[in-house]
Amino acid sequence: EKIYKIERMEPKELRTLIVCDLSHSTLFQISRESNKALLMLDLLGNLGLTRANLRDPVGLLGYSDRIEMFLRPKLGSSQVYYMAQQIFEKMNLEREFPTRRQAHLKVALDFMIARLKMRHSVIVLSDLVDLVNDPDAVDYKRLRTLGAKHDMMMLILDDPDEFRVKSRLGYIRISDMETGKQTVISARKAGAIRRRIEESRATLQYKLRHQAGIDSVVLTPENHMEALPKFLISRTARR
């Protein structure tokens, strides 16, 4: 008489949905070695594989000014590798045939409100350019609704090289990464523009935490290996 054993993976905790900003500002590359697109891929792989090893189903939602892709959460590391492949192919396509699609986080928020019936762990990977540039457009009510139902966090992608200039002398031409609009400014003003962006982003992070209950952290290609674990540990300690 033979004895059969059924082996299967069962979900251990929450379903995880990684939400990736696939607008031109995120996929734009200053350097091939270090940029926000590669940072997003790195975070997707690290977070996705960590959750997969904990037997959490992992899924992907990609957005710009429309929903670019949606993969329902599934068990196993193969799902994470497939997600990374989809993002990598999107990066290469955008590099070869730029679409300059803008980011509208509202599109992703509406999709999640409509489609996510069960509680999820939602991890947003974005530079939040649309919210930083237009603070009045932030819908904290929608964010609060999602933050109350799901375990939601925002990992804000940043590339300091975007405003790093070799010389403070003369003039430089800057370009809006999503609209393509170009402006000529004095090189010495690049630092001031960068500081204004950082201040606006810090204000946004404060409001996300206190008006929507959503934690966030700014990650760069240089600091993410240290900053992300500290952020996750601090969130766990507060809960």
Image (spheres, helix red, strand yellow):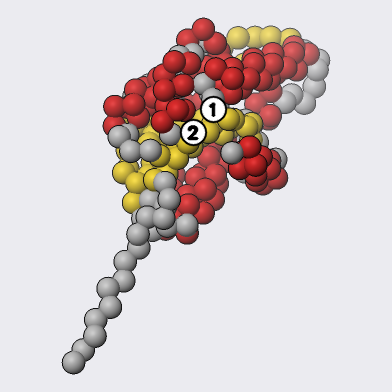
What crowding class fits label 2: few (fewer than 14 Cα within 10 Å), some (14-19), or many (20 or more)? many
Q: Determine which of the numbered discs, if any, sits on residue 124 in the image.
A: none
Mark 2 / mark 1, whichever is N-terminal: 2
- 80 versus 136 height, above or below: below
Q: Position of residue 68 (x, y in %)?
A: 34, 32
Q: Is residue 69 left or right of residue 175?
A: left
Judging depth in this view, the residue of 144 and 99 nearest the camera is: 144
What crowding class fits label 1: few (fewer than 14 Cα within 10 Å), some (14-19), or many (20 or more)? many
Q: Position of residue 2 (x, y in %)?
A: 21, 89
Identified at 68% across, 43% down, the residue is: 230
Quadrant for the N terminus in the image: bottom left
Identified at 42% across, 46% down, the residue is: 14
Q: Position of residue 210 (x, y in %)?
A: 59, 20
Q: Position of residue 236 (x, y in %)?
A: 61, 42
Task: Please name the amino acid that badge 1 sits on.
Answer: Ile
Write down the residue under mark 2.
152
Quadrant for the C terminus in the image: top right
Give the residue at the far top of this rendering.
Answer: 136
Which element type, helix, strand or loop, lies under badge 2?
A: strand
Task: Please name the amino acid that badge 2 sits on.
Answer: Met
Q: Determine which of the numbered discs, if any, sits on residue 214 in the image.
A: 1
Res 191 → quadrant:
top right
Would residue 38 be visible to someone looking at this image? no
| Residues marked 2 and 1 touching at CB (< 8 Å) | yes
